Image (cartoon, rainbow, N blue to C red):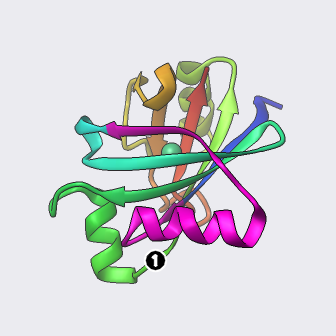
Amino acid sequence: MILTEIDHVAIAVHDLEQAIFFYESAFGASVLHREVVEHDGVEEALIRVADSYVQLTTGTREDSPISKFLAKRGEGVHHIGYRVDDCAAAIESMVAAGATPIDAEPRPGSRGTTVAFIHPKGALGTLIELVQE
Ligand code: CO
């Protein structure tokens, strides 16, 4: 088994402040980390749950994948981040199983992680992010 933890569940939201306020009110949650990832056109807020995170994510520009998702589908679960020890090996393993990578090579993610996205088609309709800490 190459998955070591569910790293995060990413939820696309229209208004990050409102979404954080909802998680604070509903769960007594507090934000551990906030980051704008220019490369992906997103701003995210991480809420820690045990050894995993809920990642509230919004778009910072109209052409970002999150903004497109929000325009098409509205708010909701956007992707699942699986923690792995070796991102490149995990891509290879998923490709061998028939999946299609969006990122053929690992690249920098938020929090100083190394990540790769795998296309939902060929992965049970789920956008998967492989996350190496
Ligand atoms: Co993610």
Pick the quarter of the image with the N terminus: top right
Give the tally of numbered discs.
1
Question: Is residue 22 or residue 120 the one in the foreground?
Answer: 22
> What is the magenta range?
11-36
Q: Is residue 96 left or right of residue 40?
A: right
- The answer to whether residue 57 shows anywhere in this view is yes
- 82 w.r.t. 19: above or below: above
Q: Where in the figure is residue 13, as x and y percent of width and height? A: 43, 69
- Quarter of the image for the C terminus: give it: top right
Q: Check disc 1 and give the amino acid type.
A: Glu
Residue placed most toward the observer, 29 or 123: 29
- Residue at image mark 1: 75
Residue 89 % position (x, y): 60, 20
Asked which secondary structure carries label 1, the reply is loop
User: Looking at the image, can residue 98 be seen?
Assistant: no
Mark 1, residues whose alpha carbon is within 10 Å: few (<14), some, or many (≥20)? some
| The image quarter in which residue 21 lies | bottom right
- Residue at image position (76%, 29%) is 2
